[in-house]
Image (spheres, grey):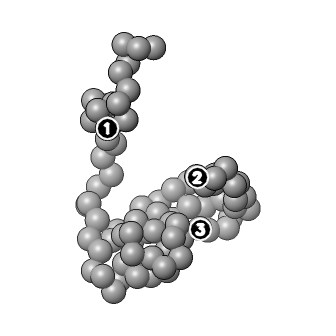
Amino acid sequence: MSGIRIQPNGPYVLTGPLTIEDGEGNVITVAEGRIVKLCRCGHSATKPYCDGTHRRVDFVSRPTFEPEPVAAREARDGSDPSDA
């Protein structure tokens, strides 16, 4: 099953099949059943991939995932839903 799992105090664990597009438009294809771990702590030497540094820096994550409120996202991005 493809999806994203958040490892407690660790990386995002993505299971293929899926594609990842980086900021330059490069596409990485993850085959079915393959796993990619993406850094959440910000300290990996191999960003965007996890290299296990979160253990050394004692990264502590939120206990649960909470989607960002729409108003906060709009304020951050400078978007206004009434412009649509």
Tally of numbered tags: 3
Residue 76 tag number: 1
For residue 48, above or below residue 3: below
For residue 41, above or below residue 73: below
Residue 24 tag number: none
Q: Closer to the N terminus: mark 3 or mark 2?
A: 2
Amino acid bearing label 1: Arg
Amino acid bearing label 2: Gly
The residue nearer to you, when weighing 67 against 79, is 79
Residue 2 visible (yes or no): no
The image quadrant that residue 6 belongs to is bottom left
Q: For the point 34% across and 42% down, which residue is it?
A: 67
Q: For the point 70% across and 54% down, which residue is it?
A: 27
C-alpha separation, residue under disc 3 versus residue under disc 1: 28 Å
Amino acid bearing label 3: Val
Q: For the point 33% across and 52% down, which residue is it?
A: 65
Report which residue position mark 3 lands on. Answer: 36
Residue 23 tag number: 2
Q: For the point 36% across and 13% down, which residue is it?
A: 82
The residue nearer to you, when weighing 21 against 62, is 21
The image quadrant that residue 71 belongs to is top left
In this rendering, the label closer to the viewer, 3 or 1: 1
